[in-house]
Image (cartoon, rainbow, N blue to C red):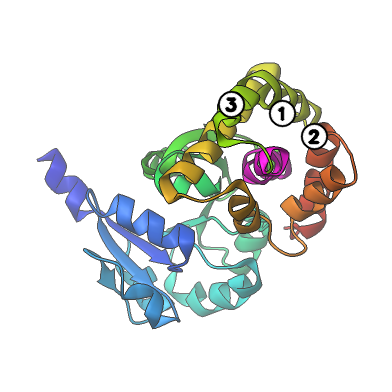
Amino acid sequence: MRMLKFLRKKIGIIGAGNMGSALAQRLRLEYRIFIFDKDKSKLQQLKGVNVAQSGSDLIKNADVAILAVKPTDFRDLLLEIKKAVRAKLLISIAAGIKTGYIEKIVPEARVIRVMPNIASRIGKGISCICQGSSSNRKDLKIANKLFKFLGKTFIFEEKMMDAVTSVSGSGPGFWAARLENMPKDKWQEFSVKIFIPEFTKAAQGAGFSSEQAFELATLTTWGALATTEVWHITPQQLKDMVASKGGTTEAGLKVLASGGTLEEAVLAAKKRSEELSKEG
Protein backbone atom coordinates (compact mmCIF):
# COMPACT_ATOMS: atom_id res chain seq x y z
CA MET A 1 0.00 0.00 0.00
CA ARG A 2 2.82 2.37 0.88
CA MET A 3 4.58 1.65 -2.42
CA LEU A 4 1.36 2.36 -4.33
CA LYS A 5 1.10 5.69 -2.56
CA PHE A 6 4.64 6.58 -3.66
CA LEU A 7 3.94 5.51 -7.22
CA ARG A 8 0.92 7.83 -7.34
CA LYS A 9 3.04 10.80 -6.28
CA LYS A 10 3.78 12.82 -9.41
CA ILE A 11 7.07 14.71 -9.58
CA GLY A 12 7.51 17.28 -12.34
CA ILE A 13 10.93 18.41 -13.59
CA ILE A 14 11.32 21.43 -15.85
CA GLY A 15 14.72 21.31 -17.51
CA ALA A 16 16.39 18.14 -18.79
CA GLY A 17 19.98 19.30 -18.54
CA ASN A 18 22.63 17.45 -16.53
CA MET A 19 20.97 17.78 -13.12
CA GLY A 20 17.37 17.59 -14.32
CA SER A 21 17.99 14.36 -16.23
CA ALA A 22 19.96 12.87 -13.30
CA LEU A 23 17.01 13.58 -11.00
CA ALA A 24 14.56 12.07 -13.47
CA GLN A 25 16.53 8.83 -13.79
CA ARG A 26 17.03 8.43 -10.03
CA LEU A 27 13.49 9.35 -8.96
CA ARG A 28 11.58 7.39 -11.62
CA LEU A 29 11.91 4.10 -9.75
CA GLU A 30 9.80 5.39 -6.91
CA TYR A 31 7.70 8.22 -8.37
CA ARG A 32 5.78 9.04 -11.53
CA ILE A 33 8.00 11.52 -13.36
CA PHE A 34 6.78 14.24 -15.70
CA ILE A 35 9.46 16.24 -17.49
CA PHE A 36 9.60 19.16 -19.89
CA ASP A 37 12.38 20.90 -21.79
CA LYS A 38 12.13 23.28 -24.71
CA ASP A 39 15.00 21.37 -26.31
CA LYS A 40 13.24 18.11 -27.25
CA SER A 41 16.53 16.39 -28.09
CA LYS A 42 17.41 16.33 -24.39
CA LEU A 43 14.35 14.17 -23.69
CA GLN A 44 15.14 11.40 -26.20
CA GLN A 45 17.57 9.51 -23.97
CA LEU A 46 15.29 9.51 -20.88
CA LYS A 47 13.44 6.29 -20.14
CA GLY A 48 10.46 5.59 -17.89
CA VAL A 49 9.27 9.21 -17.74
CA ASN A 50 6.27 11.13 -19.05
CA VAL A 51 6.99 14.07 -21.35
CA ALA A 52 4.87 17.18 -20.77
CA GLN A 53 3.90 19.50 -23.61
CA SER A 54 4.78 22.72 -21.78
CA GLY A 55 5.95 24.06 -18.44
CA SER A 56 2.40 25.05 -17.52
CA ASP A 57 1.07 21.62 -18.51
CA LEU A 58 3.67 19.98 -16.26
CA ILE A 59 2.81 22.22 -13.29
CA LYS A 60 -0.88 21.36 -13.59
CA ASN A 61 -0.17 17.60 -13.52
CA ALA A 62 2.57 17.41 -10.88
CA ASP A 63 2.25 17.27 -7.10
CA VAL A 64 5.73 18.77 -6.76
CA ALA A 65 7.70 20.65 -9.43
CA ILE A 66 11.50 20.85 -9.59
CA LEU A 67 12.77 23.83 -11.57
CA ALA A 68 16.08 22.83 -13.15
CA VAL A 69 16.66 25.52 -15.77
CA LYS A 70 19.57 27.95 -16.10
CA PRO A 71 19.38 31.17 -14.06
CA THR A 72 19.25 33.18 -17.31
CA ASP A 73 16.01 31.37 -18.29
CA PHE A 74 14.46 31.48 -14.84
CA ARG A 75 12.39 34.66 -14.94
CA ASP A 76 10.74 33.71 -18.25
CA LEU A 77 9.88 30.28 -16.84
CA LEU A 78 8.29 31.75 -13.70
CA LEU A 79 6.16 34.12 -15.79
CA GLU A 80 5.09 31.20 -18.00
CA ILE A 81 3.97 28.93 -15.14
CA LYS A 82 2.66 31.66 -12.82
CA LYS A 83 -1.05 31.10 -13.52
CA ALA A 84 -0.77 27.30 -13.25
CA VAL A 85 1.04 27.14 -9.89
CA ARG A 86 -1.92 27.35 -7.47
CA ALA A 87 -0.07 26.83 -4.16
CA LYS A 88 2.14 24.04 -5.57
CA LEU A 89 5.49 23.18 -4.03
CA LEU A 90 8.27 24.51 -6.28
CA ILE A 91 11.83 23.30 -5.67
CA SER A 92 14.44 25.44 -7.40
CA ILE A 93 17.96 24.20 -8.11
CA ALA A 94 18.96 27.32 -10.09
CA ALA A 95 22.24 28.70 -8.77
CA GLY A 96 22.03 32.13 -7.19
CA ILE A 97 18.24 32.48 -7.36
CA LYS A 98 16.90 33.35 -3.91
CA THR A 99 13.55 32.11 -2.64
CA GLY A 100 12.30 35.68 -2.18
CA TYR A 101 12.87 36.38 -5.88
CA ILE A 102 10.66 33.40 -6.80
CA GLU A 103 8.01 34.24 -4.21
CA LYS A 104 7.76 37.79 -5.53
CA ILE A 105 6.97 36.60 -9.07
CA VAL A 106 4.89 33.55 -8.09
CA PRO A 107 3.32 34.54 -4.73
CA GLU A 108 1.03 31.49 -4.58
CA ALA A 109 3.93 29.00 -4.68
CA ARG A 110 5.50 27.25 -1.71
CA VAL A 111 9.23 27.56 -2.41
CA ILE A 112 12.25 25.45 -1.45
CA ARG A 113 15.77 26.09 -2.75
CA VAL A 114 18.35 23.32 -3.25
CA MET A 115 22.02 23.49 -4.22
CA PRO A 116 23.18 20.07 -5.51
CA ASN A 117 26.80 19.60 -6.61
CA ILE A 118 28.24 17.74 -9.60
CA ALA A 119 28.68 14.39 -7.81
CA SER A 120 24.88 14.32 -7.35
CA ARG A 121 24.76 13.13 -10.93
CA ILE A 122 26.32 9.81 -9.87
CA GLY A 123 24.46 9.56 -6.55
CA LYS A 124 27.51 10.62 -4.50
CA GLY A 125 26.71 14.28 -4.17
CA ILE A 126 25.78 16.89 -1.62
CA SER A 127 22.46 18.74 -1.80
CA CYS A 128 22.06 21.71 0.54
CA ILE A 129 18.45 22.70 1.15
CA CYS A 130 16.83 25.86 2.50
CA GLN A 131 13.25 26.84 3.13
CA GLY A 132 11.54 29.90 1.69
CA SER A 133 9.15 32.01 3.76
CA SER A 134 6.18 30.56 1.85
CA SER A 135 6.97 26.86 2.53
CA ASN A 136 6.57 24.74 5.66
CA ARG A 137 8.33 21.91 7.49
CA LYS A 138 6.42 19.27 5.51
CA ASP A 139 7.68 20.81 2.25
CA LEU A 140 11.23 20.73 3.63
CA LYS A 141 10.84 17.03 4.44
CA ILE A 142 9.59 16.31 0.90
CA ALA A 143 12.59 18.07 -0.65
CA ASN A 144 14.95 16.30 1.72
CA LYS A 145 13.49 12.91 0.77
CA LEU A 146 13.72 13.60 -2.97
CA PHE A 147 17.31 14.81 -2.96
CA LYS A 148 18.54 11.92 -0.81
CA PHE A 149 18.30 9.97 -4.07
CA LEU A 150 21.32 12.02 -5.23
CA GLY A 151 23.46 11.55 -2.11
CA LYS A 152 23.80 13.32 1.24
CA THR A 153 21.50 16.21 2.17
CA PHE A 154 22.02 19.15 4.53
CA ILE A 155 19.52 21.75 5.70
CA PHE A 156 20.72 25.32 6.18
CA GLU A 157 19.26 28.78 6.51
CA GLU A 158 19.27 30.65 3.21
CA LYS A 159 21.92 33.09 4.43
CA MET A 160 24.42 30.18 4.22
CA MET A 161 23.73 29.34 0.57
CA ASP A 162 26.53 31.53 -0.83
CA ALA A 163 28.94 29.69 1.49
CA VAL A 164 27.42 26.39 0.33
CA THR A 165 28.03 27.37 -3.29
CA SER A 166 31.67 28.20 -2.58
CA VAL A 167 32.35 24.92 -0.73
CA SER A 168 30.27 21.99 -2.00
CA GLY A 169 29.46 23.63 -5.34
CA SER A 170 32.89 24.95 -6.33
CA GLY A 171 34.91 22.52 -4.19
CA PRO A 172 35.20 19.76 -6.83
CA GLY A 173 36.84 22.29 -9.15
CA PHE A 174 39.31 23.37 -6.46
CA TRP A 175 40.16 19.73 -5.66
CA ALA A 176 40.74 19.04 -9.35
CA ALA A 177 42.95 22.11 -9.75
CA ARG A 178 45.18 21.09 -6.86
CA LEU A 179 46.01 17.66 -8.28
CA GLU A 180 45.57 17.86 -12.04
CA ASN A 181 49.30 17.35 -12.63
CA MET A 182 49.67 14.70 -9.92
CA PRO A 183 50.01 10.94 -10.62
CA LYS A 184 46.70 9.16 -10.07
CA ASP A 185 48.15 6.82 -7.42
CA LYS A 186 48.81 9.91 -5.24
CA TRP A 187 45.30 11.39 -5.41
CA GLN A 188 43.82 9.58 -2.42
CA GLU A 189 46.77 10.21 -0.11
CA PHE A 190 46.87 13.88 -1.10
CA SER A 191 43.11 14.19 -0.54
CA VAL A 192 43.27 12.72 2.98
CA LYS A 193 46.48 14.29 4.26
CA ILE A 194 46.48 17.70 2.62
CA PHE A 195 43.33 18.71 0.75
CA ILE A 196 40.61 17.77 3.27
CA PRO A 197 42.34 19.48 6.24
CA GLU A 198 42.96 22.63 4.16
CA PHE A 199 39.44 22.56 2.72
CA THR A 200 37.92 22.09 6.18
CA LYS A 201 39.73 25.22 7.37
CA ALA A 202 38.55 27.09 4.27
CA ALA A 203 34.94 26.01 4.88
CA GLN A 204 35.16 27.29 8.45
CA GLY A 205 36.43 30.59 7.06
CA ALA A 206 33.30 30.75 4.89
CA GLY A 207 31.09 30.52 7.99
CA PHE A 208 30.48 26.83 8.74
CA SER A 209 30.99 25.25 12.16
CA SER A 210 34.00 22.93 12.53
CA GLU A 211 31.75 19.86 12.34
CA GLN A 212 29.84 21.12 9.29
CA ALA A 213 33.07 22.20 7.60
CA PHE A 214 34.73 18.81 8.04
CA GLU A 215 31.70 16.88 6.77
CA LEU A 216 31.20 19.16 3.74
CA ALA A 217 34.92 19.14 2.90
CA THR A 218 35.19 15.36 3.21
CA LEU A 219 32.04 14.52 1.23
CA THR A 220 32.84 17.07 -1.48
CA THR A 221 36.33 15.64 -1.90
CA TRP A 222 35.25 11.99 -2.09
CA GLY A 223 32.40 12.93 -4.42
CA ALA A 224 34.86 14.64 -6.76
CA LEU A 225 37.18 11.63 -6.72
CA ALA A 226 34.28 9.25 -7.37
CA THR A 227 33.11 11.38 -10.28
CA THR A 228 36.48 11.11 -12.04
CA GLU A 229 36.43 7.35 -11.52
CA VAL A 230 32.84 6.69 -12.62
CA TRP A 231 33.08 8.90 -15.71
CA HIS A 232 36.72 7.98 -16.49
CA ILE A 233 37.72 11.63 -16.72
CA THR A 234 40.79 13.60 -15.68
CA PRO A 235 40.85 16.30 -12.98
CA GLN A 236 41.29 18.85 -15.79
CA GLN A 237 38.08 17.63 -17.41
CA LEU A 238 36.24 17.73 -14.06
CA LYS A 239 37.50 21.26 -13.42
CA ASP A 240 36.28 22.39 -16.84
CA MET A 241 32.84 20.87 -16.17
CA VAL A 242 32.45 22.67 -12.83
CA ALA A 243 33.87 26.07 -13.82
CA SER A 244 31.39 28.08 -15.86
CA LYS A 245 32.47 31.39 -17.38
CA GLY A 246 32.05 34.23 -14.90
CA GLY A 247 30.92 31.85 -12.17
CA THR A 248 31.94 31.16 -8.59
CA THR A 249 34.36 28.32 -9.35
CA GLU A 250 36.18 30.38 -11.96
CA ALA A 251 36.62 33.18 -9.42
CA GLY A 252 38.23 30.78 -6.94
CA LEU A 253 40.39 29.09 -9.57
CA LYS A 254 41.88 32.44 -10.55
CA VAL A 255 43.00 32.87 -6.93
CA LEU A 256 44.63 29.42 -6.90
CA ALA A 257 46.30 30.03 -10.27
CA SER A 258 47.90 33.22 -8.93
CA GLY A 259 49.34 31.38 -5.92
CA GLY A 260 46.55 32.07 -3.44
CA THR A 261 45.47 29.68 -0.69
CA LEU A 262 42.44 27.40 -0.74
CA GLU A 263 40.87 29.56 1.97
CA GLU A 264 41.27 32.64 -0.24
CA ALA A 265 39.82 30.74 -3.21
CA VAL A 266 36.71 29.76 -1.23
CA LEU A 267 36.20 33.34 -0.06
CA ALA A 268 36.55 34.59 -3.64
CA ALA A 269 33.94 32.05 -4.78
CA LYS A 270 31.62 33.09 -1.94
CA LYS A 271 31.98 36.76 -2.88
CA ARG A 272 31.20 35.95 -6.52
CA SER A 273 28.11 33.98 -5.44
CA GLU A 274 26.91 36.98 -3.46
CA GLU A 275 27.39 39.18 -6.52
CA LEU A 276 25.44 36.78 -8.73
CA SER A 277 22.55 36.23 -6.35
CA LYS A 278 19.25 37.84 -7.19
CA GLU A 279 17.81 39.65 -4.20
CA GLY A 280 14.27 38.81 -3.15
94 sits to left or right of 255: left
For residue 67, say whether it is visible. Answer: no
Q: Percent from the top left, x then y, of residue 164?
A: 66, 40
Residue at image position (77%, 59%) is: 276
Quadrant assignment for the C terminus: bottom right
Q: Percent from the top left, x then y, of residue 114?
A: 54, 48
Q: Residue 47 appears in which quarter of the rendering?
A: bottom left
- Find out whether the residues at labels 2 and 1 contact each other: C-beta distance under 8 Å: yes
Which residue is tagged 1? 199
Between 192 and 220, the one lying in front of the other is 192
Assess whether residue 128 is covered by the magenta stretch.
no
Q: Say few, some or many: other residues with alpha carbon within 10 Å of mark 1 (under 14 / 14 to 19 / 20 or more).
A: many
**Main SS class of the magenta portion in the image:** helix
Q: Say few, some or many: other residues with alpha carbon within 10 Å of mark 3 (under 14 / 14 to 19 / 20 or more).
A: some
Assess whether residue 164 is covered by the magenta stretch.
yes
Quadrant assignment for the N terminus: top left
In space, the residues marked 1 and 3 are separated at their CA atoms by 8 Å
Residue at image position (34%, 58%) is: 24
Which residue is tagged 3? 218
Task: Name above or below for residue 59 compared with residue 39.
Answer: above
In space, the residues marked 2 and 1 are separated at their CA atoms by 7 Å
Task: Name above or below for residue 20 compared with residue 184.
Answer: below
* Most distant residue in the left direction: 1
What amino acid is labelled 2 in the image? Leu
What amino acid is labelled 1 in the image? Phe
- Magenta-colored span: 162-180
Q: Percent from the top left, x then y, of residue 200?
A: 70, 24
User: Element type at marker 2?
Assistant: helix
Which residue is tagged 2? 262
